[in-house]
Image: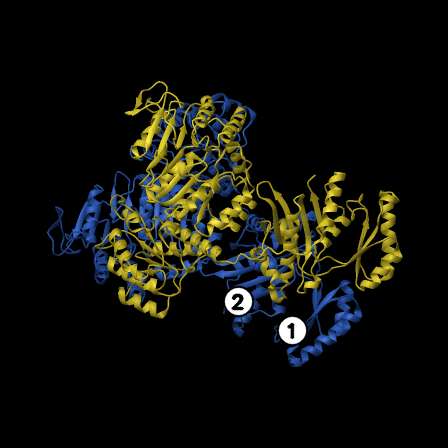
Chain colours: A blue, B yellow
Amino acid sequence: MKNLDGFFKPKSIAVIGASRTPGSLGKMFIESVVKYKYTGQLFPVNPKADQIDGIPCFPTIESLPDQIDLAVILVRKEYALPSLEACGQKGIKNVIVITAGFKEIGGEGIEREEQLKAIAKKYNQQIIGPNCMGLINSEEEFSLNASFSPTEPDSGSVAFISQSGALAVAILEFAKNLRLGFSIFVSMGNKADLKDIDFIEYVAGQDRTKVITLYQESIEDARNFLVKAKEISHQKPIIILKGGKSSAGQKAASSHTGALASSDSATQAMFDQSGVIRVKTIQELCEVSLAFSTQPVPGNDNICVITNAGGPGILATDAISENGLQMARLSENTIQQLKETMPEEASANNPIDMLASAGHEAYAKCTEIALQADNVGAVMVIIVPPPVDTTPRKVIETIAEARKVNPHKPVFFVVMAQHEHEGGELDLVTELSIPIFDYPESAAQAIAAMRKYDKWKRKKTGNIRKFKVDSVKVRTIVDRLKNEKREHLFDEEVREVLMAYGFPTPRFTVAKSAVEAIEFFRKLNSPVVLKIESPKILHKSDTGGVKVNLTSEEEVESAFSEILSNARKVVSDEEIKGVMVQEMIKGGREVALGMFQDPNYGPMIMFGLGGIFVEIFKDIIFRIAPISDVEAQEMIESIKGYAILAGARGEQAVDFDIIVETMLRLSQLITDFEEIIEMDINPLLTSPVAENTKAVDARIRIKL
Amino acid sequence: MKNLDGFFKPKSIAVIGASRTPGSLGKMFIESVVKYKYTGQLFPVNPKADQIDGIPCFPTIESLPDQIDLAVILVRKEYALPSLEACGQKGIKNVIVITAGFKEIGGEGIEREEQLKAIAKKYNQQIIGPNCMGLINSEEEFSLNASFSPTEPDSGSVAFISQSGALAVAILEFAKNLRLGFSIFVSMGNKADLKDIDFIEYVAGQDRTKVITLYQESIEDARNFLVKAKEISHQKPIIILKGGKSSAGQKAASSHTGALASSDSATQAMFDQSGVIRVKTIQELCEVSLAFSTQPVPGNDNICVITNAGGPGILATDAISENGLQMARLSENTIQQLKETMPEEASANNPIDMLASAGHEAYAKCTEIALQADNVGAVMVIIVPPPVDTTPRKVIETIAEARKVNPHKPVFFVVMAQHEHEGGELDLVTELSIPIFDYPESAAQAIAAMRKYDKWKRKKTGNIRKFKVDSVKVRTIVDRLKNEKREHLFDEEVREVLMAYGFPTPRFTVAKSAVEAIEFFRKLNSPVVLKIESPKILHKSDTGGVKVNLTSEEEVESAFSEILSNARKVVSDEEIKGVMVQEMIKGGREVALGMFQDPNYGPMIMFGLGGIFVEIFKDIIFRIAPISDVEAQEMIESIKGYAILAGARGEQAVDFDIIVETMLRLSQLITDFEEIIEMDINPLLTSPVAENTKAVDARIRIKL
């Protein structure tokens, strides 16, 4: 873990490129630092000025005092590298490079960024940026606004790490309207040195940070990110808004940051596997953060809605159901208690509609009753002004007092049509540490995110099982292909790999003569398939090289000679290695296993139903390898077609253990051999009986 | 169409229950009317007051002058009906009943609402409400705020009709933040008399209303609504937020309004068939309305994004793709022109990133270039403050001026992090009639809604074809079942119905002897299925009553006697009508047709792939009958499995014409016989050859 205290808690800051010119970046920056009441020493560097806003200036970096914690470089791009070099010589170890004109502009910018990295390495410097907006630490002791954000965030417990400065401004602004407070904010820019995971690790160690949020476009060292994010997610929620998820968006991402964008299936797998919470919009990022930073996680999916108007109650019910949550079923006892506190015309069934006449005492009483109901995981309180003789503020205050009896269950407030934000109920967000949303949909979405996180945290990790395999055999084959500069394994080699790693495969032999073929058929005592065995024949069916469902010795014999004579029409005798005789596997549900190398995440495993289900219904799922047994089982259960495997329409369920085992063997194989860049097992024929489950066909491609 | 001028443009209003008590509904109401500068005559009715706020009071309704256009009833529920009666006697034809305590409270409330309807009928009165919040007409000439909404909406071109008063308040408030202006607003309450479609028809006829919006929970006279909404959608967009779409939400809806909620599949069919635009949230309702009320509809799906910051450009690209739109591909020529107006480091590829240094002139120039590109359907301009030496307001003004060269293409503005709403760019929404959104996601969603509407408007309606059928035959069967009080048709009757309506069915006979069976088999000269024909045997397979794929006379003979002897084990000889011999239909893709009666919309038609595709993948679609040929074709094309029918994996496409024809025959049958409440044709075996397409199995249930 990197120590970033020098950035967030510096005792002294040099501002290279500080300026007196109104409206200039160098002036705005100094103003920000001063306005935010920085308590350390500030050293503006400007060769042409004696002082800026009364703060004495230094003409050069060389002339600065020693032992400065942090330098901020704001100069024009041509001067950025010499400034960094000078900082290095001066012994300044932490530098924020605000200056733009690096990797993001391509061409010479890429070169400039490489030079920047080299300088940082030489002087052992840590760099934020270049092309960034700086950082903010709201901790009172340090009060550092080393950014030119036009919005000063409220102090709070959410850390916010952003790859885009512009989006950060929008997020800080939206957060302000919600009264969401931040512990630190940092704009990472091009991430030449310090990256997402460095900041995540740093804030994970802070007591004052409860929730970690990111706006992320590119991801670097993705596997390391996955491993660490997973670890940290168990302690604190990490919430990410990922930009560039569409392939069109990826294009924009790559032109913007110069980073190679992830394909979204890999990205989604990362989220699912690491427990990182994915949000889709700026608004959702802020709202979900507000929920996590103010409320405990609901203990179950059953939500109770209390409202003083029917329409919002209906929208809340819709939103709860659309977000995969349930409306809590209230017990007779709870309903009876509710009825006693409300007028006769009110509805005590969830959603509890107290009617427009509800006052703050009644609200508090109902909330208390709902919180006491065992099966209620969370309460959503909806207030439509103007309630008679009360205000939303008064309602919320009274509820906050009443809920002290049950502080472990979360309450989410929705104030519809907030007419007077100023001095009204919104101040309570900070005062009482409660979330107030504008709409029931926002509250439901936030609750759903909390529930998903909680389920992820509670689930078993499982084991990455290691099977006894013959990796030497596979090494020999892979090396052979590399030597021959051949990407695709021959069928024979594929079978050898599958057997070396213990995949369930159909029995087979490669027969040199019809007699051998018949002999094998007799031994099997079940129908067989015959296929030409020749590395030169790629499309076997097209050239008459395949005969299926052969059930008699006569059929085997004539198929053998037919296949051979067909083959001789297209290749020479030396190129024919024989005819493969394989056990014919029939019936059973087809599933497809596969793997590919994601440019960011490396080997990925795919699972899905075979055939049209993959191609047309896209009923598939990806995971980053290696996977555990629990993850394999989850993959199987997560596809829609799972119901088919589990025995829809009265059929028997297939044997899942052998499928899981096969997936784990695949995971082990592709982890052991990073040269394998594509592999398909399609179909893997499944069956209620483990012994009848077989990898019928497979293809493997390696990287040369 | 009902004339509602008496409500929205009254020359005189009587307020029954006007009050002097501060904070009371009767006082607030008078204040609202006065504050909104109503120009007509106001007659408060209150037996205990001489005047209210200087306006002379009348002690009773009887004492009012004659020929009053509108009465508003605000009295306690016990006095509501006598007041309405008195209004009737006084000849007041238009009455808004604000008073609550009717159907929505159940019990005596239901009775009270029935009495209200009876009074209205007796005096030929039109009623808004009861249990409503009143109405607003922003037309300057009338300036009527006959509501107690705490928010006064801005004047504009959007009509807003709401079933919930509380939600209306939230919507009016949100709209105000967006600067969305309204032509009229009306709260419908319990809809005892005037309903959604009455208001829709009224505002459809207004020049000043360009966009019609609704918050709707229940729907009454749903088929009439569908027909009229479809007609009006061709003139003006209708946008609906439907509350109660989840089954849990439906429960809330029914307890709230006492209306039986629609199942969502029928509701969704209504939206798809009528061209009504469905929105999911309050926010979306307002944002989509803003787009429609200020911009022309984009001519195609290709969007060009212009931004001064990368991050928002990426989010915009993601949002455009997620909403089913495309990023416009710019021509070399366009890119060249863009490059000439921007600094070298800027990106001229869509999204066009002008960089933070972009001024208003450059923005205007780029927008103009983008608007001139032929394939660009709309331009989204994203502004992140602070652009150097300019403001979002200045940027938008300059663009508005420049775009005059191309006024037919829409421009959507996104101002991220609107820091100073007051006196800033938001005023331009009204001044220039342009939409400004907070986020690219909002703009993309609104554009997508416009495009969907445009496509719906342009598509052909198609024909509801009428086939020559034998309806007398079906009438006889239906009447027979009614007489016998039997819900389910026997197989024989089902076949008769199918044949009477010309469905493609397999050839068959009911054989009394093995000889007859063999004779038919010989005539067919193809494999057959034998099934026991007995109304008493429901589960034929279970009792050995079915034999399939019989390919020889011997097989037919032995199957016949076997089936017969099996049947004799469970029923008596008189109950056996023979053995059905049916052409065996093999191969082909299975599809499923079906119908059911929706409680609101009546007969609905379902189409989907058969088997697991219906049960597990839910790959099905519903339409309200009758359907046109174009609609039938659309249904087929809309399911995911369409690719399978159209010939995935190199197979031949099935004959779609015969499927369409079968669907239209089904549509005709269930439209002719409203007694049919459930029907399944499953499977309809399809084929590349029309003649081989057959309804293999069917079931019909009628309502007794």
Q: Against B687, is B599 above or below? A: above
Quarter assignment of residue A143? top left
Query: Circle 2 marks a residue in which chain?
Result: A
Tell me: B54 left or right of B6: left
Task: Report whether residue B446 is seen.
Answer: yes
Marking on residue B271: none
Q: Position of residue A630 (x, y in %)?
A: 56, 47
Which mark's residue is nearer the viewer, 1 or 2? 1
Residue pictured at 27% horizontal, 65% vertical: B341
Task: Report whether residue A180 is seen.
Answer: no
Tell me: A695 left or right of A19: right
Marking on residue A542: 1
- Secondary structure under badge 2? strand
Marking on residue A702: 2
Q: Position of residue B656 (x, y in %)?
A: 62, 61
- Secondary structure under badge 1? loop
Which kind of residue does numbered mark 1 sit on? Answer: Asp
Residue pictured at 25% horizontal, 41% vertical: A142
- Callout 2: few (<14), some (14-19), or many (20+) C-alpha neighbours within 10 Å? some
Quarter assignment of residue B84? top left
Tell me: A442 left or right of B572: left
Q: Against A230, is B349 above or below? A: below
- Callout 1: few (<14), some (14-19), or many (20+) C-alpha neighbours within 10 Å? few
